[in-house]
């Protein structure tokens, strides 16, 4: 708080002001990084929430667990076929079949699951070019695309199944010819095909689960980064305000010398650090608004005084104005929301035409509907 309005700032106070400005700039840079992170974080959080709502009854996790179990069983019953095809690394074919099964399942899932169609409808509605389209047209487009994928997926599904069946029969024929086996092709030899079919059906939601996991992990990282930047901004904001308060105590004349916008923002944020909107107020950069202060100045006899008023606000904005003959001022201050006047310097002439200067400290809200009446001694 200024103790001498006419005294120039000391060298020590100017050094403290420079430190305050530098620390406030770091805080504001951190809040900018937090805002940029939040722009990515918020839409993905909304997307995950909507996905979970749409897919809540789709039994994604049980299907995916069943898929993993069936993959193991499929490889156990098909490994001899894979050894015939690629003796050096039969597991490569097993992994290839799993990958192909997931692709086929993704091609077929739209026609088999209304949940996935609803999810795709939700995603299509988010596209800007579809904003003006009726929902019925978007759903028709989703269904048309789904049918096209399903046709291709079914062809691929039959082709891979036929290939597994063919190689299974060939393996049995070779074993019989070599005298290793006596029984003909039987039900047990169809098991690789059966497990392949089950693998595709159980894998309907595997790709969705993978996509959701990727988005969820990305969001988790962004949430950590966001929280880190907000906390960095909070700590540096508090530190900046402390340095500025120390600068004023050491003689920094806030009214005569410059105050950077970094520091204005710092005092705005510092005011909101204990509110329910703390994170929001540390991240969002508020817009300045023209706020008014209305007051009437009187002497001890309750007669109006014509005064010149210099004011400083809580966020370190300053303004000056001379009242009219009735002692009334309507002062405008371009400041951040919820600012208030903390200190006045009032210059006037008394009844003996002697110049007087008074300092007043307090909390005076801006945009006050009731005119303040301030009595001067």
Image (cartoon, helix red, strand yellow):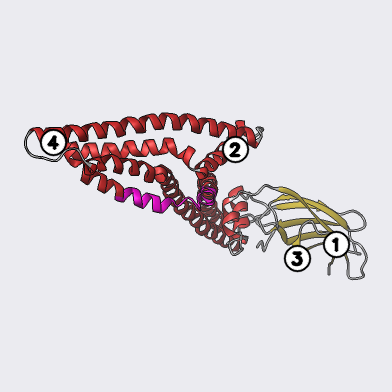
Q: Are marks 1 and 4 in contact (CB under 8 Å)?
A: no
The residue that appears at 13% across and 35% down in the rendered structure is 87
Write the start and end of the magenta stretch as one range.
48-69
Instruction: Answer yes or no: is residue 86 visible.
Output: no
Q: Which residue is mark 1?
A: 370
Structural distance between the alpha carbons of marks 1 and 2: 49 Å
Where, by quadrant of the figure, is residue 141 drawn? top right
Structural distance between the alpha carbons of marks 1 and 4: 90 Å
Of tags 1 and 4, the one toward the viewer is 4
The residue that appears at 68% across and 54% down in the rendered structure is 255
Q: Which residue sits furthest front?
A: 183
Of tags 4 and 2, the one toward the viewer is 4
Secondary structure beneath dot 3 equals strand
Q: Which residue is mark 3?
A: 360
**Number of residues whose C-alpha sits closer than 10 Å to that of mark 1, classed few (under 14), some (14–19) or many (20 or more):** few
Secondary structure beneath dot 4 equals loop
Structural distance between the alpha carbons of marks 3 and 4: 90 Å
- 341 in the magenta segment: no
Where, by quadrant of the figure, is residue 303 drawn? bottom right
Q: Which residue sits furthest left?
A: 179
Q: Which residue is mark 4?
A: 88
Q: Earlier in the sequence, mark 3 or mark 2?
A: 2
- 245 w.r.t. 98: above or below: below
Of tags 1 and 2, the one toward the viewer is 2
Of tags 3 and 4, the one toward the viewer is 4
Q: Earlier in the sequence, mark 1 or mark 4?
A: 4
Q: Which label sits on residue 125?
A: 2
């Amino acid at each position: 708080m200024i103790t001498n309005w006419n005294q120039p700032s000391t060298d020590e106070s100017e050094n403290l002001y420079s430190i305050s400005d530098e620390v406030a700039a770091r805080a504001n840079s951190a809040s900018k990084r937090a805002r940029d992170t939040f722009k990515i974080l918020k839409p993905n959080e909304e997307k995950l929430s909507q996905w979970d709502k749409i897919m809540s009854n789709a039994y994604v996790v049980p299907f995916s667990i069943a898929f993993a179990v069936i993959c193991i069983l499929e490889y156990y019953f098909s490994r001899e076929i894979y050894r015939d095809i690629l003796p050096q690394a039969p597991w490569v074919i097993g992994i290839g079949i799993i990958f192909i099964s997931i692709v086929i399942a993704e091609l077929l899932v739209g026609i088999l699951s209304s949940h996935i169609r609803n999810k795709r409808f939700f995603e299509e509605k988010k596209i800007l070019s579809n904003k003006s389209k009726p929902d019925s047209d978007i759903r028709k487009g989703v269904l048309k695309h789904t049918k096209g994928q399903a046709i291709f997926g079914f062809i691929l599904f039959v082709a891979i199944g036929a290939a597994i069946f063919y190689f299974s029969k060939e393996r049995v024929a070779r074993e019989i010819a070599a005298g290793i086996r006596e029984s003909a092709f039987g039900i047990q030899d169809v098991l690789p095909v059966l497990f392949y079919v089950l693998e595709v059906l159980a894998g309907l939601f595997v790709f969705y689960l993978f996509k959701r996991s990727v988005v969820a992990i990305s969001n988790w990282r962004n949430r950590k980064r966001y929280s880190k930047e907000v906390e960095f901004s909070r700590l540096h904001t508090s530190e900046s305000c402390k340095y500025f308060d120390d600068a004023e105590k050491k003689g920094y004349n806030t009214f005569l010398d410059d105050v950077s916008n970094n520091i204005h923002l710092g005092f705005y944020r510092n005011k909101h650090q204990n509110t329910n909107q703390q994170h929001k107020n540390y991240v969002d950069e508020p817009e300045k608004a023209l706020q008014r202060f209305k007051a009437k100045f009187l002497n001890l006899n309750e007669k109006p005084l014509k005064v010149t008023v210099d004011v400083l606000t809580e966020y370190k904005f300053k303004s000056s104005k001379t009242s009219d003959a009735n002692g009334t001022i309507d002062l405008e201050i371009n400041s951040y929301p919820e600012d208030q006047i903390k200190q006045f310097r009032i210059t006037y002439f008394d009844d003996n035409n002697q110049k007087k200067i008074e300092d007043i400290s307090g909390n005076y809200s801006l945009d006050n509907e009731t005119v303040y009446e301030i009595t001067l001694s």
